[in-house]
Structures are given as C-alpha cells and as structure tokens.
Amino acid sequence: MEKIVILTGAGISAESGLGTFRDEGGLWAQHRIEDVATPEGFARNPALVHQFYNARRVQAAKAQPNAAHQALARLQKDWPGEVIIVTQNVDSLHEAGGAKHVIYMHGTLAGALCGNCGHCWTSPLEMEVDEPCPVCQQPLVRPDVVWFREMPYFMDEVHDHLAGAALFASIGTSGQVYPAAGFVQQARAVGARTVELNLEPSAGASMFDETHLGSASTVVPRWVDQLLAQGSTQ
Ligand code: APR
C-alpha cells in the first residue's frame, strides 16, 4: 500500500503557542543563532545556551497539541499504508497528539546529552550548567538538540523512507535549512507526489505538485480528510 512520508517544522506547533524561528519576531529575531544553537556558542557560554533551551523546555511542557498534530496521528491510524512523520521540531507535540514512531531529526528538548561521553538521558525541566553526567561525572551536559553544523539524527532511516514514498508532504517549514529542505527533491526523484501545507509559500514551493496555504490547524485536518476519503495518494 502507498507509503506517505511527512516532514514537519515549527509552523505546525505555532498554534500551540510555540515560537517559530524565521517569522516576524521569531526565535532568531530574539537570539543570535551563533550564540545559542552552535557547538561554538555552547563552548563560549553554556549558561546562555541552557537559559535559551530551559525557557523553551518550560514553554513546550505547557503546550498542547493542536488539530494539525492530531490529524496526522489520525492519518497514521486510518491510512492502510505506512505514514512516517519526520520532524525538525524538538517539542513532543506529535506524540502528545497521538502520533507513533516520530523521527526527531533535530533531537528533542526532553533529551539531555553528555558532551564528554555521549550518554543520553531524560532532561530535567531546567538544566544546570555544571550538572555532572550520571555516567562519566563530567560537567558537560547539553540539550540533546542538533545544532547548526552538526549532523541531524536518523538520516539513513529518513532517506530509506523517502526512497519508498508514494507521497511526500511538507508541513509548517520555511524550507531554508538542509538536509530537511532537500527531502522534496529526493521524493520527486523517486516519482512521489509532493504536497506543501504552510502559512505561506516556502523557499521550495516551486518543487511541490500541490500547495495548501493557511494555518496548519485548518489546512492539515482538511487535507487528511481528503486523503482518507480518496484512499489514494495520486
Ligand atoms: N500554520 C502553518 N504554517 C505556519 C504557521 C501556522 N500557524 N505559522 C508559521 N508557519 C510557517 C511559516 O510561514 C514558515 O514558513 O512555518 C514556517 C516556519 O519556518 P521556520 O521558522 O524557518 O521554522 P523551520 O522551517 O521549522 O526551521 C527549520 O531551522 O533554526 C533551525 O533547527 C531549527 O528546526 C529548525 C530549522
């Protein structure tokens, strides 16, 4: 049965109250990427990085999944084939909305990582700068989030899923950050149909066969209803 691969970005969590990055007043208007989302920034000032992620973790813990998250979980449940959700987001709203086996290619706010030995564990709501790693005791704990110039997680698995996709949908992402922004080209190369659902056309809009413009909580449930009603991705 036809396999659907879905990529999501910050726009799907916007209506749950979590900030996006590149919209007016977004996170990258409030913080310098170099300071809070790079290994160099962390080495320079770990306290600032923890402050940035602690604030996002506290906010994400209070957020509720919206109708878009719930609609994708319904698609996973009711679609006769595989539905794979790959997210650039580090919040857990897809799973809170009922989705399964979500692929977190940029890591998660819920994860802590030891910068020394690589041990991962569940992060406290607010991380301390010199919290010792439970395994090697070194005080180099960091959020288990993928920063710029670091390798995203699970790329081999994502490429395998894309290679077998009949439909690729991109939801709530500006299409400006690779490798995620390149997934649509991979999907097209294997003949998959490509759909974009976003508030406004993304940087890669011209590569999509179909576009649904609007707020995710409106356009995603409507698109899922259409897909389930037609029973085919074409
Ligand atoms: N519904 C649908 N789309 C929305 C909504 C909404 N309510 N609000 C905003 N959007 C769209 C915006 O139009 C924009 O195209 O979501 C997109 C958000 O884009 P970005 O802020 O660039 O977020 P994203 O694409 O997820 O960023 C990718 O960049 O900074 C890194 O690691 C970070 O994962 C992030 C990656």
Image (cartoon, rainbow, N blue to C red):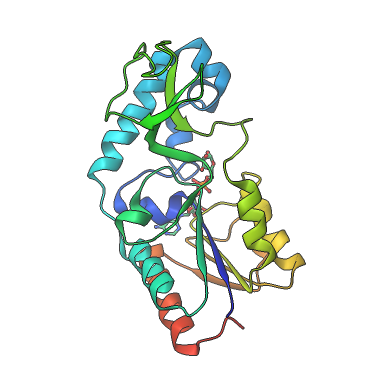
Residue projecting furthest to the bottom:
230
Question: Which quadrant of the figure contains the N terminus?
Answer: bottom right
Residue 160 at what x, y percent from top left?
A: 66, 58
* Closer-to-camera residue (153/44): 153
Residue 51 at what x, y percent from top left?
A: 35, 22
* Closer-to-camera residue (157/38): 157
* Closer-to-camera residue (46/136): 136
Q: Is residue 28 above or below residue 49?
A: below
Q: Which residue is drawn at 57% across and 17% down?
A: 40
* Closer-to-camera residue (56/163): 163
Q: Can residue 171 be seen in this view?
A: yes
Question: Which quadrant of the figure contains the C terminus?
Answer: bottom right
Residue 202 at what x, y percent from top left?
A: 59, 57
Residue 105 at what x, y percent from top left?
A: 53, 45
Residue 94 occupies which quadrant of the picture? bottom left
Q: Is residue 203 visible?
A: no
Residue projecting furthest to the front:
135
Q: Which residue is drawn at 53% across and 18% down?
A: 41
Residue 135 occupies which quadrant of the picture? top left
Q: Is residue 124 above or below residue 209?
A: above
